[in-house]
Image (cartoon, rainbow, N blue to C red):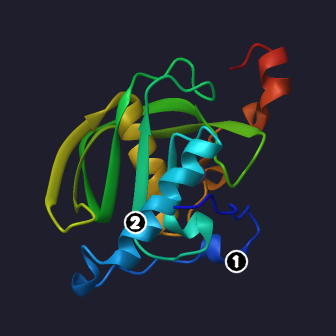
Amino acid sequence: MSVQPILKMGHPMLAQVSQAVPQDQLGSPHLKTLVGNMLATMQAVNGAGLAAVQIGIPLRVMIFGTTKNPRYPDAEPVPTTVLVNPTVTVVDPKPCEYFEGCLSVPGLRGPVMRPSTVRYEAVDVEGMPIVREATGFHARVFQHEFDHLNGVLFPARVTDFARFGFTEELERGGLV
Ligand code: NI
């Protein structure tokens, strides 16, 4: 497991659709190394989530989880989760607003509206099924990472550009 460099917005790979992990790769040393590298990288920078494409591997693999995260001090804990080939269904489309950030968009935050509750299905690194209903910060971080798998970064979803900016400026203005 090793900490990897994180691609930043503008790198063309971040705009591409990631490919499904082939069935015969589930449980493989290659996939386990990828996930290990993702976990090490996310922990090294106090991230709440990371998609494989952010370390230059365009496969449909995401991780997330947080206990007490200094980047998101108000966020409730989310179990550390590894998802391979996830799919999503909206359970409650009621839109919620939250100021998102991204390790590939360092220093910036902006308000993004997303459905409040989703159900996701995926397999873990060994190919075992995972089905969960998620709400609150859990639903938020899942949907943010899921977007990465489809080449979408949060600035494309910012709903109010008057409140999109550098974290320290937003904090100084009392916006976050
Ligand atoms: Ni991100």
Task: Give above or below for 75 relative to 119.
Answer: above
Left or right of residue 82, residue 92 in this image? left
List x then y, in percent, for residue 13.
Answer: 64, 77
> Would you call the spot at circle 1 few (<14 residues within 10 Å), some (14-19), or many (20 or more)?
few
Task: Give above or below for 75 relative to 147.
Answer: above
Residue beneath disc 1: 12
List x then y, in percent, for residue 120.
Answer: 24, 52
List x then y, in percent, for residue 89.
Answer: 23, 53
Q: Are marks 1 and 2 in contact (CB under 8 Å)?
A: no
Residue type (three-letter) at the residue carrying disc 1: Pro
Q: Is mark 1 within 8 Å of ligand 1?
A: no
Q: Residue at x 46, y 69 (%)?
A: 34
Q: Residue at x 44, y 75 (%)?
A: 59
Q: Residue at x 51, y 30 (%)?
A: 97
Disc 1 secondary structure class? helix
Left or right of residue 65, residue 40 in this image? right
Q: Residue at x 77, y 30 (%)?
A: 167
Residue beneath disc 2: 61
> Which image quadrant is residue 160 in?
top right
**Who is closer to the viewer here, 41 or 129?**
41
